[in-house]
């Protein structure tokens, strides 16, 4: 299915190869094309695995996973403490959402609604089958703030280009716009950010918590948000560098690179 998609969307596939070459200038063209091919094959796996998940029991889903160093945030969640789970579009993030929901007491996700009504209804149903709360990515802050304050583990996919509330900074050494939401919520509520490295290892999906970061004790400001966002984005960058074939290169991550570069040259931290 993934290979078929490269034929259906050839321009997007070519752009993903170009993005990989810019990210890994020391790799050969053949190596970059192989990363792109595996990344697109992973898209096909995501679709089929997620569609099949509705027929699986909790136990069957968990057998697909290996959680490493995640005891702290599972324990916090069981004790009613809020937290933020920093995620990216790696491996099968949809299945990770289901597996994490199974292992937690209170779970919520910031999710982007699908344009197709019927697809959106199906995906929403599947994402919430184990009791997770879905928060629309359109104006998500207040709902997310309330959820975290009530002891919810809030998962945020923070590795893609965002439409609003964007900050400008380099992502993988290229100007980009990034979401400040994990940093803002953590600074406002004081809850920690759990950084998750997520990748495939053979037939297992591995979720490894690399670090739990508490917000710095500084006065809240735009610069404080930008500084903390940079720290968190570096964690996502490292996951891409460590596991490039597991990342969603099909997404146009640098769609506003020119806008971001211009803003950064003018000394802007964020969009007006």
Image (spheres, grey):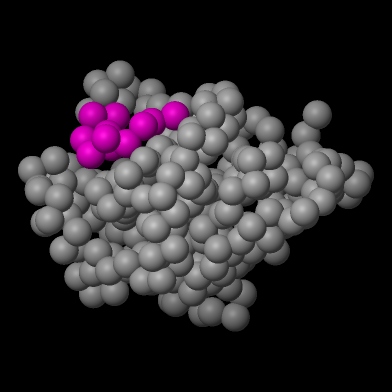
Identity of the residue drawn at 23% across and 55% down: 45
Residue 131 position by quadrant = top left
Q: Nearer the viewer, residue 79 or 32?
A: 79
Q: Nearer the viewer, residue 199 or 80?
A: 80
Q: Is residue 10 shown left or right of residue 158?
A: left
Q: Is residue 65 magenta?
A: no
Tally of numbered discs: 0
Q: Position of residue 136 (x, y in %)?
A: 46, 27
Q: Is residue 262 above or below residue 128?
A: below
Identity of the residue drawn at 59% across and 48% down: 191
* Residue 26 shows in the view: yes
Return the residue found at the far front: 79
Identity of the residue drawn at 61% across and 61% down: 213
**In the image, which residues are magenta?**
124-135
* Residue 48 shows in the view: no
Identity of the residue drawn at 54% across and 68% down: 211
Residue 162 position by quadrant = top right
Which image quarter holds the C terminus?
top right
Q: Position of residue 251 (x, y in %)?
A: 48, 47
Q: Is residue 125 magenta?
A: yes
Q: Is residue 236 above or below residue 132?
A: below
Return the residue found at the far top: 117
Q: Is residue 211 shown left or right of residue 164?
A: left
Q: Is residue 149 shown left or right of residue 117?
A: right
Q: Position of residue 104 (x, y in %)?
A: 32, 49
Q: Position of residue 197 (x, y in %)?
A: 45, 66
């Amino acid at each position: 299915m993934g290979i078929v998609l490269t034929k259906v969307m050839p321009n997007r596939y070519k752009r993903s190869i170009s993005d990989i070459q810019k990210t890994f200038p020391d790799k050969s063209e053949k190596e970059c094309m192989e990363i792109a091919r595996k990344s697109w094959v992973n898209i096909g796996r995501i679709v089929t695995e997620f569609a099949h998940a509705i027929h699986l029991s909790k136990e069957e889903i968990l057998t697909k996973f290996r959680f490493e160093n995640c005891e702290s945030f599972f324990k916090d969640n069981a004790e009613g403490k809020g937290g933020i789970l920093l995620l990216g579009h790696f491996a099968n993030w949809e299945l990770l959402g289901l597996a994490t929901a199974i292992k937690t007491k209170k779970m919520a996700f910031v999710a982007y609604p699908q344009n197709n009504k019927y697809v959106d209804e199906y995906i929403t149903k599947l994402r919430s089958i184990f009791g997770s709360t879905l928060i629309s990515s359109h104006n998500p802050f207040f709902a997310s703030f309330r959820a975290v304050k009530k002891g919810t583990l809030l998962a945020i996919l923070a590795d893609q280009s965002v439409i609003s509330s964007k900050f400008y900074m380099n992502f993988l050494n290229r100007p980009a716009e990034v979401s400040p939401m994990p940093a803002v919520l953590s600074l406002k509520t004081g809850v920690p950010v759990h950084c998750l490295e997520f990748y495939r290892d053979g037939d297992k999906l591995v979720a490894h918590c690399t670090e739990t970061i508490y917000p710095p004790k500084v006065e809240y400001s735009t610069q404080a948000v930008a500084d903390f966002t940079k720290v968190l984005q570096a964690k996502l960058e490292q996951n891409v560098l460590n596991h490039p074939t597991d990342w969603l290169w099909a997404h146009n991550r640098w769609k506003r690179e020119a806008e971001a570069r211009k803003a950064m040259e003018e000394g802007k931290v964020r969009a007006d």
